[in-house]
Amino acid sequence: MNRYIQDYINLVRSGVSPMCREQYQLADLIEYTFATENLVVDEDQLERYMGLLRYFPYKLLPWESFLFALHNCVYTQEGDLRWPCLVIVVGRGAGKNGYLAFEDFALLTPVNGIKNYNIDIFATAEDQARATFDDIYAILESNEAYFKKYFTWTKEEIVNKATGSKLKFRTAAPKTKDGGRPGKVDFDEVHAYENAKLIDVAVTGLGKKKHPRRTYITTLGDVRDGPLDKLMEKAKKVLSRLVPDNGWIYFICRLDSDAEIMQPETWGKANPSLNDPNRRELLKEILLEFDEYKDDPAGHSAFATKRMNRPQGDKEAEVTSWDNILAASAPLPDAGYLEQRSAVFGIDYASTQDFVAAGILIQADGNYYWITHSWVCAQSKTLSRINFPLAEAERRGELTMVYEPEISPDIPVQWVESMREKYRLIMGGIDQYRYTLLAKAFAQHGFDPDRKKGNLKLIYSPEQSRVAPIITSAFLNHKIIWGDNMLMRWYTNNAIRIIDRRGNITFGKIEPKSRKTDGFMALVAAFIVAEIKRDEMTYYNLDSGLPDLYVY
C-alpha cells in the first residue's frame, strides 16, 4: 500500500488524534480492499501530482493526501480507477475547497494524461460554485508570468494549454454539447441540494472521457431527505460492509454524539484539520463560536450543524426531530393484520388547484398506523417552486398527478370509499375550509355529514392544541408508523408548531408556497377524530362488531 494511504490509516489507529467511528470503519475497509483485491498504485503519477503542490500556498494534510491517492492513483488490474467517486463530509473550516482546488488543478495538467479532461464544479449558489475555481484563479494570478506559458484563464474559465482541459463553475445543468462531456464533476455543499435533478443531469455526461470522476464536498445541513441524506444512508451500509462500495469512498468526519459538542477535545472528529498544530487561528474562531452556542444553542445551532456535523434542526419550531420522522418510516404490518380494525380518516383539501391528501389512521398494539395518498394538480402555479421529486413519489405510488384544472372532491372521496372496503371507518375529519364541498361528495357515497350525529367531523384549527401533545409523544416514542413514505417525511419536516401567548399549539408551514404540509395536516385531522372516538378506536378489533351507528 502507498505511504500516503498507510500513513493516514496508521494515524487513525494511533490514538494521537480523536477520530469518529466512520474513520475507523473506512480504515478497515481500505485495508481489507487492498488485502483482497489485486490493486495497483501508480506511484510515479502520484509523486508527479504531489510535485504540483509547490505552486500552492499550502500543503495537503494527511487526510487530504490519503484521499487524493485513493481517488486519483489507485487502479484495478484492468486499468480502471478503483475509487472514481469521492464523498467528503467534514466540518466547516477543514479546508475541503482547498483540497478540491488542488485535485482539480492537478487533473487539468498533463500528469493526468487525458486530453480535454474538462471539469465542472456545481453548487446551488454562484458564490459557492466558484469558491474552488477562485482558489485556482488566485494561484494563477499570483504568478502570472510563469503560468501564462501553461494556462489561459478568465473569471469564467481556466484552460490548460497542453491538454485543452477546461475548468468551469456552474449553478445549472450545461446546455452545450461540450459542457455535457466532462471528465469530472464536482458538487459543492451538497447539503443545500433539495433534490437530485442537477446532480442527475451532471453525471449523465460522464463516461465519454477515460477515467470519469466525481467529487462531493460538504458539511451536514438542515435539508432532509435530499441527496446528502441518501449519500449518508448509503455510506452507513458501505462502511459497515453490508453492501459493496462500487467505487465510492465515503470520508465522513463528525462527532459521535451531541454530548461531544460540549467537549472541545473531541472536535477533531468533525474537523480533521484541527489536529494540525498550524490551525490555531481556526481553533480560536471555533472557540468564540462555541461561547455563543453555549449561551444560546437554539440561536446558534449552525455551530453544531456546520462545525460539528451534528444537525440540530429548529427544536423550538419543528414538529419533531428528523430521527423521529425516520422512525415513522418503519414498515407497516401485513395488510391482514390491520384489515377490519377500527379506523378514522383525515383529509386536507385546502386548495383544489394544489395538493390534496387523505389518510386512514388505525390504532393497534399501542401504535398509530397511517395509510395515506396524495393528489397534485398538474396545473398548479406553485409547482415550479417545489424542489421535492414529485415524479419519484408518483413512481413509488405515494401520489397521483391530476391533469385537470382542479382536483375534484370525488377523487379523495373515492379513495376513502376504497379504504372502507378494508377497514371499519367510524368517522372522518375534514378541514373547515372545504367542508361544504367535500361533505356533498361524501353524502353521495353514503357518508352522513350531519354535524351532530353524522360520521364526518368538521375540524377547527383550535382543536389542534388538544392533540398536539399526543402527536408529539407518539413521535418521541416512535408510535407513529407510515412505512417508507418519502412524501410524508417531506410533509412533516415542512410543518412547524405555532404557540400562542396562552400556550396553545397549532400547526403551520415553514414556507407557504414551496413547502407543502398537506399529508401531515390530514394526519392531524385524523388524530383529532381518533381522540373523539378514542373508546371505539381502542376497543373494537377483529373479533368485535361495531354498533349500528357506525355501520354504513
Image: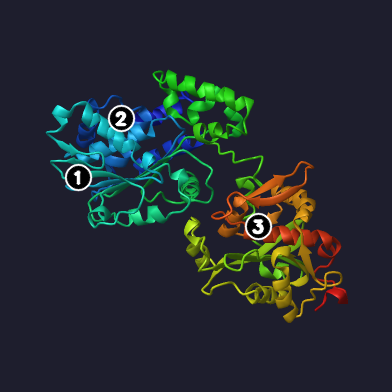
- Pointer 2: what residue? 3
- At label 3, counting other C-alpha atoms closer than 10 Å, the crowd grade (few under 14, some 14-19, many 20 or more) is many
- Pointer 1: what residue? 165
Circle 3 sits in a helix, a strand or a loop, which is it?
Answer: helix
Q: Is residue 37 visible?
A: no
Mark positioned earlier in the residue sequence (2 or 3): 2
For the point 67% across and 69% down, which residue is it?
A: 335
The Cα–Cα distance between marks 3 and 1, rounded to whole angstroms, is 50 Å
Q: Is residue 370 above or below residue 409?
A: above
Q: Residue 195 versus residue 542: which sits nearer the camera?
A: 195
Q: Residue 34: x, y in percent?
A: 34, 41
- Pointer 3: what residue? 520
Residue 129 picture quarter: top left
Residue type indicated by callout 3: Phe
Q: Residue 371: x, y in percent?
A: 66, 65
Q: Residue 48: x, y in percent?
A: 20, 32
The Cα–Cα distance between marks 2 and 1, rounded to whole angstroms, is 29 Å
Mark nearest the camera among 3 and 1 is: 3
Mark nearest the camera among 2 and 3 is: 3
Circle 1 sits in a helix, a strand or a loop, which is it?
Answer: loop
Q: Residue 397: x, y in percent?
A: 55, 68
Q: Quadrant of the C terminus?
A: bottom right
Task: Give the total of numbered labels.
Answer: 3
